[in-house]
Image (cartoon, helix red, strand yellow):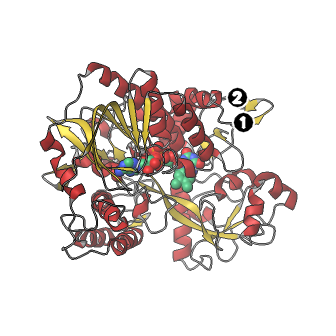
């Protein structure tokens, strides 16, 4: 018998419980809305936020004088002429307020002499990045927001709830269809306003710093609902992701804060400093932005001067044991458990897929171009242009989350109860209920691995038209089938992977075709066949889903002026 869906009504539905989703839920609730916060994982523990270990950029100016305008200037410069200025301004202007609110809620920002202290990070012109000491920033932010949510009875939380599609009625988003991962139960949520806060897409790549929940669901949900995406070609690779020796139980991008503190040296396979070959004067310092450092390491490896596992060395051998202990704190013991002694050996590092600059197009109220749909956090496109500054991602999650929550609550106040016409949820419910055992089974795990290999090998940081075309053909050739196989009424990993792949294939295609269309090099998008940055390309590529096909267009002329 076909199970009836569980029906839920709410003022505001927030999808995703990273920093963006949790702040959105808190802000919507304190503006009078009843909120349902849904996440496919455990609440507040599923995405990038809880994994982030380093810093949050914000012009607090407690130690060194600073203004949001200075932060904005650095953000715009790092974005290589492509930042959405309204979003970048919102990010920088509202950051101090959000950071102080988290401080008030007890996050525990590191302090010196009673003042919140800030560290230097590449691309910032002064120490501007706050942190919770010893790589605890993300977990502390997450815990603080979870605790703040727990104080508000207007926020209901539903973990293990995977949103499969947004519901669109008369051109407006009126809720979502989900399934409960543990039982397979279908769920229909009616909402007066919906906030999409599903994070990024780096699971598309073989070597990534992500959790498995970051396959780009939000971009695909938005496309199918009729929203516009921008800048999808700009995937950020983090230059010094851990490569070797084996490091168990630690974040692959954990080296960065220690590099800030101690001036870790980046060396090629011959143990020479090399970034000056690529136009940087950072030797001995640490100022190179992520796009340039990524490029330098890849080029050094291609020239045959890589480290044994195909990256570069990161060395702290010039530091004393005492200096290492002071900077690394308890982390030094966890490294020792992994047989890593930094006084005697370098580690190997290499670029790793880390963050997505592109995403859903939004205005400064965080409204997408589909009424009823708001966006927050990494799923938003444009704020960081072609290259993101260190620390700006958690900041945008907090700032955009708060703004989206406020906007969603305001819409909910204006709306009468949203009613879902059964036909608008039917297609998604049909997929969720499909129990298609007789169909030949796809090996979904092998398809995920193949897609990740295609993206890593052909749509990485350094691209050519030929590689991108090959990738697009390979992605298009991956046949998922019309309906999921597996059991509809139980937890089934293959079934979940089918739903994941449905989104991943669409999002991978969007990244690839926009990369193919951009015939220049800019920030995180480096084309070997078009090495110059060209003024005529200083604008956003937009992607929409038209009659089931991805369609790329240029933004209006106003978006093309510097
Ligand atoms: C290892 C690592 C370290 C980082 N370090 C830093 C740092 O030091 N500083 C910095 O500024 N940035 C850092 N970043 C980037 C930053 O953490 C993220 O950009 C930011 O946390 C994103 O927040 P978010 O709320 O948008 O998304 P996330 O925190 O990723 O949360 C998204 C949530 O959406 C849920 N979700 C996804 N799809 C669905 C669906 N279909 N249905 C229901 N729920 C769904 C996920 O389960 C997840 O819980 C780091 C990222 C990583 C991976």
First in sequence, mark 1 or 2: give its number: 2
| Spatial CA span between label 1 and label 2 | 7 Å
Q: Is residue 497 above or below residue 192?
A: below
Q: Judge left or right: residue 417 versus residue 85.
A: left
Residue in the image at 63% along x and 48% along y: 54
Q: Disc 2 marks which residue?
A: 62
Residue 13 seen anywhere in this rendered image of the structure: yes
Quadrant of the drawing holding the C terminus: top left
Residue in the image at 41% along x and 30% along y: 405
Nearer to us in this view, 169 or 346: 169
Q: Which mark is residue 250?
A: none
Residue in the image at 77% along x and 62% along y: 333
Q: Position of residue 555 (x, y in %)?
A: 26, 42
Nearer to us in this view, 366 or 410: 410
Q: Is residue 86 above or below residue 179?
A: above
Q: Quadrant of residue 9?
A: top left
Nearer to us in this view, 308 or 148: 148
Q: Disc 1 marks which residue?
A: 117
Residue 543 seen anywhere in this rendered image of the structure: no
User: Label 2 CB, ligand 1: below 8 Å?
Assistant: no
Q: Is residue 469 above or below residue 518?
A: below
Q: Are marks 1 and 2 in contact (CB under 8 Å)?
A: yes
Quadrant of the drawing holding the N terminus: bottom left
For mark 2, give the secondary structure: loop
Residue in the image at 56% along x and 63% along y: 278
Q: Position of residue 72 (x, y in %)?
A: 51, 34
Q: Judge left or right: residue 393 versus residue 252.
A: left
Q: Position of residue 511 (x, y in %)?
A: 33, 58
Q: Quadrant of residue 481?
A: bottom left
Q: Judge left or right: residue 343 versus residue 299.
A: right
Q: Position of residue 132 (x, y in %)?
A: 68, 42
């Amino acid at each position: 018998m076909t199970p009836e869906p569980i029906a839920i009504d709410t003022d505001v539905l927030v999808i995703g419980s990273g920093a963006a989703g949790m702040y959105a839920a808190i802000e919507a609730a304190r503006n009078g809305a009843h909120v349902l916060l849904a996440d496919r994982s455990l609440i507040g523990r599923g995405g990038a936020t809880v994994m982030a270990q380093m810093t949050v950029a914000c012009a607090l100016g407690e130690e060194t004088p600073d203004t949001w305008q200075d932060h904005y200037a650095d953000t715009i410069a790092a974005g290589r002429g492509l930042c959405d200025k309204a979003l970048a301004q919102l990010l920088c202007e509202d950051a101090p307020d959000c950071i102080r609110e988290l401080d008030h809620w007890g996050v525990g920002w590191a302090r010196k002499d009673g003042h919140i202290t800030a560290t230097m990070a590449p691309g910032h012109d002064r120490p501007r990045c706050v942190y919770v000491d010893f790589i605890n920033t993300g977990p502390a932010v997450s815990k603080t927001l979870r605790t703040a949510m727990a104080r508000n009875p207007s926020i209901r939380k539903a973990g293990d709830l995977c949103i499969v599609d947004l519901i669109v009625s008369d051109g407006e988003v009126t809720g979502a269809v989900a399934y409960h991962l543990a039982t397979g139960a279908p769920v229909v949520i009616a909402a007066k306003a919906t906030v999409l806060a599903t994070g990024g897409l780096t699971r598309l790549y073989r070597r990534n710093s992500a959790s498995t929940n970051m396959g780009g669901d939000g971009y695909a949900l938005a496309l199918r609902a009729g929203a516009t995406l921008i800048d999808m070609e700009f995937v950020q690779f983090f230059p010094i992701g851990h490569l070797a020796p084996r490091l168990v139980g630690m974040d692959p991008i954990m080296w960065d804060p220690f590099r800030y503190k101690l001036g870790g040296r980046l060396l090629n396979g011959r143990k020479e400093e090399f970034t000056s070959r690529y136009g940087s004067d950072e030797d001995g310092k640490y100022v190179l932005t992520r796009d340039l450092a990524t490029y330098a390491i890849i080029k050094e490896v291609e020239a045959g001067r890589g480290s044994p596992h195909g990256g570069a060395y990161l060395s702290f051998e010039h530091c004393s044991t005492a200096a290492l202990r002071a900077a690394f704190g308890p982390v030094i013991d966890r490294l020792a458990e992994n047989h890593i002694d930094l006084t005697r050996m370098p580690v190997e590092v290499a670029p790793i897929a880390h963050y997505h600059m592109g995403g859903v197009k939004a205005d400064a109220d965080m409204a997408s171009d589909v009424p009823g749909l708001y966006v927050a956090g990494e799923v938003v496109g444009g704020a960081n242009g072609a290259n993101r500054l260190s620390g700006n991602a958690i900041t945008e999650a907090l700032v955009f989350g708060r703004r989206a929550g406020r906007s969603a609550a305001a819409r909910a106040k204006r709306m009468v109860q949203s009613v879902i016409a059964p036909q608008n949820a039917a297609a998604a419910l049909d997929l969720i209920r499909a129990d298609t055992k007789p169909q030949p089974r796809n090996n979904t795990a092998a398809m995920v691995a193949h897609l990740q290999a295609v993206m890593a090998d052909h749509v990485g940081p350094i691209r050519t038209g030929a590689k991108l075309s090959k990738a697009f053909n390979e992605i298009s050739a991956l046949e998922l089938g019309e309906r999921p196989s597996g059991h509809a009424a139980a937890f089934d990993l293959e079934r979940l992977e089918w739903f994941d792949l449905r989104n991943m294939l669409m999002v991978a295609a969007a990244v690839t075709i926009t990369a193919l269309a951009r015939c220049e090099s800019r920030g995180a998008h480096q084309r070997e066949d078009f090495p110059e940055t060209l003024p005529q390309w200083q604008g956003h590529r937009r992607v929409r889903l038209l009659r089931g096909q991805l369609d790329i267009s240029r933004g209006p002329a106003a978006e093309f002026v510097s």
